[in-house]
Amino acid sequence: MDLLSPPVAFHFTVMFVGMVPPVPDMAFQEVSGLESGLDTEPVVEGGENRFVHQLPKPAKRGNLKLKRGMSTQASGLVQWCKSTIEGDFAEAIVPKDITVSLLNQMRIPVAVWTVGNAYPVKWTVGGFDAMKNELAVETIELAYTTLVRSV
């Protein structure tokens, strides 16, 4: 086993902090949207026409997308999505912190991202096709405020 080898992208875990009831169905086939970036605003220096300064704006983040086989309504994640998206704002949105860990062969995290204040903004069920032998797949898209890589 070579400890300097780049990690594989298919060995990862996703954990929701404070999910009630405890969620045993957190197996995802795909995670995407772990991204941050800075936009800049051009500012022309007064009296000096040779320079245009690029000033940073606040960091922007994409949405976190979690893809998995469709789950039942008994799932804590499904219940959270339903109450947030289908609740018509009758109750306050309850954000969750999420930890995504990329693991090595010994299940030790080699990279960990903490996604803060996440909440579902889109819930998609893949198409059904009687001519294919595939699982029904759902994609949950979450907006979030912070993204921190700790390892």
Image (tube, rainbow, N blue to C red):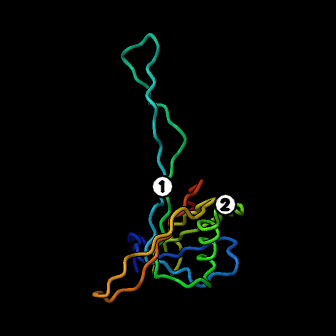
Q: Residue 30 in the image: x percent, y percent?
A: 43, 73
Residue placed most toward the observer, 132 or 90: 90
- The structure residue drawn at horizontal position 55% and vertical position 58%, both measured from the top left corner, is 143
Residue placed most toward the observer, 96 or 50: 96
The Cα–Cα distance between marks 1 and 2, rounded to whole angstroms, is: 23 Å
Is residue 110 found left or right of 5 in the rendered image?
right
Task: Say above or below: 45 vs 139.
Answer: above
Task: Using a 10 Å C-alpha cutoff, classify the residue at mark 1 as few (fewer than 14 neighbours), some (14 to 19) or many (20 or more).
Answer: some
Quarter of the rendering containing residue 67: bottom left
Residue that label 2 marks? 89
Q: Residue 63 in the image: x percent, y percent?
A: 49, 59
Task: Using a 10 Å C-alpha cutoff, classify the residue at mark 2 as few (fewer than 14 neighbours), some (14 to 19) or many (20 or more).
Answer: few
Q: Quadrant of the N terminus?
A: bottom left
- Find the residue positioned furthest to the left: 131
Task: Say above or below: 99 vs 132.
Answer: above
- The structure residue drawn at horizontal position 56% and vertical position 56%, both measured from the top left corner, is 147
Residue that label 1 marks? 62
- The structure residue drawn at horizontal position 63% and vertical position 76%, both measured from the top left corner, is 79
Residue placed most toward the observer, 135 or 16: 135
Q: Would you say residue 11 is visible in this rendering?
A: no
Residue type for callout 1: Gly
Task: Say above or below: 47 vs 102.
Answer: above
Q: Residue 57 in the image: x percent, y percent?
A: 52, 37
Q: Would you say residue 91 is visible in this rendering?
A: yes
Residue type for callout 2: Phe
Q: Are circles 1 and 2 on residues that touch, CB within 8 Å?
A: no
Is residue 120 found left or right of 70 in the rendered image?
right
* Label 2 residue SS: loop
- The structure residue drawn at horizontal position 60% and vertical position 85%, both measured from the top left corner, is 24
Sequence-wise first label, 1 or 2: 1
How many numbered dots are placed on residues in this image? 2
